[in-house]
Amino acid sequence: MATPATVAATPVTVQSVPKRRRLRFVANPKAAIGLVLMGIFVLLAIIGPWISPYDPSARSSALVAPPSAAHWLGTTHLGQDVLSQLLSGTRSVVEVGFLAGIVATAIALLVGVTSGYLSGAGAETLSALSNVFLVIPALPLIIIITSILPETTDFAIALVIGLTSWAWGARVLRAQTLSLRGRDYVEAARATGEKTWRIILFEIMPNLTAVIASNFIGTVIFAVTSEITLAFIGVNTSGDNWNWGTILFWAQGQQALGQGAWWWFVPAGLAIALLGTSLALLNFGIDEFVSPRLRSNGKTKVRTVDGHSVRMRVGFTPVLGHSADARPGKPIFGRKDES
Amino acid sequence: MRYFLKRIGFYALTAWAAITINFFIPRLIPGDPVQSLITRSRGQLSTEAVQSLYVLFGLDKTDGLVTQYFKYWGQLFRGDLGVSFTFFPSQVGEVIGQSLPWTLVLVGITTIIGFFIGTALGTLAGWRRGSWIDALIPVTTFLSSIPYFWLGLIAIVLLTGPDSFFPASGGYDTGVVPSWDWDFITSALQHGLLPAITILISSMSGWILSMRNMMVTVASEDYVTVAHAKGLSDARVMVKYAARNALLPNVSGFALSLGFIVGGTLLVEIVFSYPGVGYQLFQAVGTKDYPLMQGIFLIITLSVLLANFIADLAYMLLDPRTRREG
């Protein structure tokens, strides 16, 4: 990054500006923390099953043992290692989250942009459809569908979640497309005879990137909590397919709370909360990147030269010092008799 | 008026869609769930009940899909949601009727309170950007990232115990009989307090954030600057000028996200073994009680639709533009 002094001395360093711009998203502390946490979870999803010290389903003689050197996060009622279950479970959680996010975002994009850009009965129908799906409570629907499915693999669950949770994104994307459709540059593209698909893909889509990204992240959060909830209430808990919800399911079923076995359910819950927070922080980062006004600025109370304190707000520019043509000693701000 | 009619039409459409989804879901079930139920009931099922179950599950192979669909609607209009497996031989309608008031009170009241507190905090946070309320946002984000049910589990561990004020489970003391007397009401309130706090904490942050962002946007509008320039008091400008307009998207957002909120709050009931619809859904999943599951889904959806309709009426009161004739 160039300091102001060097910019003034050598105009050549202006070239460094694009480089700074590229890193602007990461420069936001919220986005940076979110990205780092997210990276850790993705890494764990990849290497988790390999680095976990035990087989998550393997039993041992240490039943409901508190954390020790052998079992860092203690054991379950069957002597299974909680840390191994947590590490192995990360993959399922991240997989389902991302897969459901991709499915839902793809449908949302298709429905939202189509119903926003095109007009007529078809677009109205699509919009009504997304509103219907929005109002129908998604979680009970997901619970019912998955408990009726004969076989609940991670893939099937991700698909069910993706297919039922696209409506919010479709609505947001439709609104954004509607507002973009009337902009001058789109009108100009249409006037020069650009094809509809080209206008949608190259004129409108690039301006939807931030909305798409934040919508994807929102869906991932929803999918992760839904998957864990499903496992917690007892859908998809059979077999060796571990995820964080399965750990909580067994902890709840075996009265871990009553036994005081905090190590059994606290780590899984914290992992969910951390993953959720990292995604939410990324979303804040995107929001603030797109709309700088949402950033919270550090200092809002400023002292003027004459000792008044002024609260900064939008659309309001306080004068802090004496300007050149003001009478000396006369404060410029905050007096009613100034005209 | 036109807006009003449009909304009514939309709700009719959604109700129809929900019922149709409900019609098709059991047709995905492999095997013959009715046969297993007949076996389990050891011959106590009447022939009519068996026939109604076959219609409900779409196993009535003598009819085509269209005939089945109309028969299904016929059953619904008679209020026949089938027979529950778990609470055999009770009707699903009766079973849900017992639990629905609990959920309506707990979830309804806490959702509304959460909306109001969250909106109020969000108004302040947006108006005084950079003040201490802004520091609340990361905290509430963290809290809202936690699934409702886990927060409930932690609350049970930390706050309940043999000599604690908060009971760990149930909707009222086992010693009192449900009736409208003082003992029962205080006992129900005592049992509802902790689930209510859990729901409040996790549902509030969304409202804080969206209201803050709307306030920040509205605060730079010309009419707000004009109001300041007129010398109106800061509080008056905040509430009557900025917040009033910032509230509109929040109210429509409230209506739309009700489905999400209700889904999440049902889980709190599971953790606290609260005798509401969510806990019943949990029991139904455990015992594969398909008629009860379907009935609960239908009731939840219809309640959410009704709540949406009320939120729409509130929106019409707040925004004069929707009341314009034409």
Image: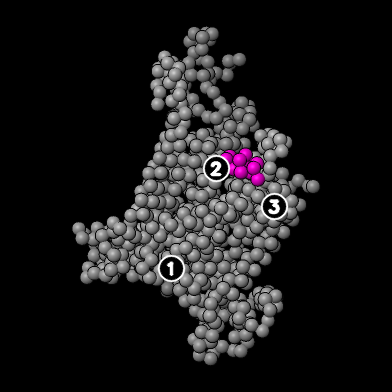
| Residue B273 placement: quadrant | bottom left
Determine which residue is flagged by label 3. A123
* Chain ID at mark 3: A
Determine which residue is flagged by label 1. A236
Q: Do pointers 3 and 1 mark residues of a single chain?
A: yes
What's the amino acid at mark 1?
A: Asn
Sooner in the amino-acid sequence: mark 3 or mark 1: 3
Q: Residue at x 49, y 86 (%)?
A: B40
- Residue B261 seen anywhere in this rendered image of the structure: no
Location of residue B121 in the rendering, given as x and y in whole percent from the top left corner:
50, 43
Location of residue B30 in the rendering, given as x and y in whole percent from the top left corner:
53, 77
What's the amino acid at mark 2?
A: Thr
Apparent side of residue B166 relative to residue B302 in the rendered image (left or right)? left
- Residue A1 seen anywhere in this rendered image of the structure: yes
| Residue A164 placement: quadrant | bottom right
Q: Is residue A138 above or below residue B247?
A: below
* Chain ID at mark 2: A
Location of residue B89 in the rendering, given as x and y in whole percent from the top left corner:
54, 83
Q: Secondary structure at mark 1?
A: loop
Q: Secondary structure at mark 3?
A: helix
* Region rendered in magenta: A197-208
Determine which residue is flagged by label 2. A209
* Chain ID at mark 1: A
What's the amino acid at mark 3?
A: Ala
Apparent side of residue B286 relative to residue B57 in the rendered image (left or right)? left
Q: Residue at x 79, y 47 (%)?
A: B326
